[in-house]
Image (cartoon, grey):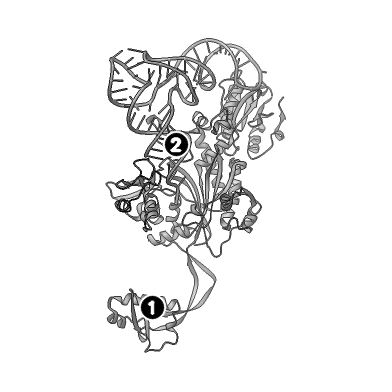
Amino acid sequence: MSDASDEHPETDLMELAKRRGFFFQASEAYGGVAGFYTYGPEGATLKQQVEDAWRDRFVTREGHMEIDAPTVMPEPVFEASGHLDTFDDMIVECPSCGESHRADHLVEDATDVADAEALPTEQVEALIVDHGLDCPACGEPLAGVDVTDFNLMFETAIGPGSSQAGYLRPETAQGIFVEFSRLKEYARNQLPFGVAQIGRAYRNEISPRRGLVRVREFTQAELEHFVDPETDEPPLERVADVELPLYSADAQQGDGDIETLTVAEAVDENVVTSDWVAFYLGLARSFYERIGVDMERFRYRQHLPGELAHYASDCWDAEAEVDGNWIEITGFAYRGDYDLSKHAKYADADFTVFQQYDDPVTVERAVVDPDMSVLGPEFGSAAGDIAAELDRMAAAGDEQFENLSDDDVIRVEANGTAWGVPADAVDYHVEEVTEAGEHVTPHVVEPSFGVDRLVYTVLDHALETDEVDGETRSYLGLPAEVAPTTVGVFPLMSKDGMDDRARDLAGTLRQAGLSATYDDSGAIGRRYRRQDEVGTPYGVTVDYETLENDTVTLRDRDSTDQIRLSVEDLPAAITALRTGGDLADWGDPVE
RNA sequence: GCGCCGUUGGUCCAGUGGUAGGACAUUGGCUUCCCAAGCCAAUAGCCCGGGUUCAAUUCCCGGACGGCGCACCA
């Protein structure tokens, strides 16, 4: 047995999450649906705080912008992005052993068909019959077995009838790429700039698993940092000394282990090849620590060569260890110009940025100005293509144009045929042009965070069990910044006016901007435990002494230490403690 | 999607062919001057559909959901 119970003998995370309102299976009243979770009151707040911390770190503090795009987008977007093809898996299921296989892969492996994925299913079925393919698992023939499409995108119809096909976005990124033209306008055509988005994405997973780890609807926090590949460099000096626990592809393939390098070392030794990726690995590390990811159970893992997406040259995942498994919580990818180039090809918009030179440059450029009144009658319908080819040849510096005299004939390959074009009809000349700049397709650096997995990791890493006065206690050691509630306020007993006093005090703390909860049910110890279990970092108790001298006790969740301080100082004390103050600075220890 | 196992108050479990019991939690009361105490009481449950049967929470079939393994994870 290597399940969670080893580590948390008293409390299982899923059980706590259900019981205390962090998250639970959605639509349970109707039997539940796999892969969908509802965040309860505690979880929704926790998730919000994690998102706020992310926004602070990756948007506000970096001077980036944030947008909020629709979750439904029309089909052509996903033709361009490649999701329609690559998300459309052909599956064939062996009738004898029940194994599912990618039908297109089977065909590609066994035949000289290179791109079976692009073929209709009927044709793939026919290829399986023609080549007598067998099940790789059990060897039984697969001829005659149905090949079915399984698309991981949720499809929907936009408008009445079947007017337009749309899909729920499988990643938030496309919402940014699609709007690039307006966004760069907003950025006043200046590279670099970063656009962030926190939002839902949808994947119709074949098999959702393990709580929040693999779900069908999830929240991503993505940053697309658009940079000029020639001139923009990341400010590596800001993170040069940050230590990165790196698990390189080499280490994974050999018997290597996690190696801790500073960002500067990782770049110098070329362990991380992209400076931009290295920069974000450094920046993100402090974010993970801040929201409560245990750095002892954290690593950056490089994608193996076979694992790399087709557009990425180097890619690292941030991974956290949860329940004995490493789960991906962030992907850091250098996507190059893949996305913008694809959209440029498919869409009717400009996906480049015009980069002005510091000083305009004057260049000599060879051009042709073919006399179409000669080429037209001479070459008929090929004339246009021939002119275009001449244009290309001149720009490429074709040697035929050197020392040209009027009665020469220029050989041109167009439409698969060789043509001879009289030189006097071409008007080849060299002209001086002044160029103020150039159109650049920006490259994209993409840190992409899975918010739900972050929340799940933070909860798992926060769950602690200790012993207080001989009793086992479980509590969530959440950082105060992300804890759903900051302070619990309790009357020692609900009589003699202590309850009214405590209720007032909770109100006062809320007015001071603190998230406070009031509880007078049961014994005081029981109320402390309730708040411990949802990670509330501080507890304030109103007792008889409060009624005499306006002082209260303030309890620290992790140590259960208490101090006594005046009610007047309370809002300031909690505010200070929340951002890392020391309990002892604010009052005298109790007992 | 396949295979194995499972599904009983809010939670975790026990149990039964004649509709169920515990622990914890929750609520009310008594008690209690700071860490899940005690006492009394209350609330609350057999995943769904079909079949077999006089009778199904229990047995059979199917489904949903969950755990694990395989496959999948652009």
Q: Residues within 10 Å of mark 1 (few under 14, many from 20)?
A: many
Q: Counting residues from the N terminus, which is met first, the one under dot 2 or under dot 1?
A: 2
Residue A277 x/y as whole percent: 56, 55
Tell me the subunit letter for badge 2: A
Residue drawn at the location 35% of the way across and 52% of the way down: A75
Tell me the subunit letter for badge 1: A
Residue of label 2: A37
Judge from the rendering whether residue A136 lies leftward or rightward of residue A481; answer left or right: left
Residue A537 x/y as whole percent: 61, 33
| Rendered position, B15 above or below A135 | above
Residue of label 1: A390
Numbered disc 2: secondary structure: strand
Which label belongs to residue A250? Answer: none
Does the residue at mark 2 contact the one at mark 1 (Cβ under 8 Å)?
no
| Type of amino acid under label 1 | Leu
Instruction: Inspect this view and state whether residue A243 appears.
Output: no
The reply to whether label 2 and label 1 mark residues of one chain is yes
Image quarter in which the C terminus of chain A is found: top right
| Type of amino acid under label 2 | Tyr
Image quarter in which the N terminus of chain A is found: top right
Numbered disc 1: secondary structure: helix
In this rendered view, identify the residue nearer to me: A560 or A85: A85
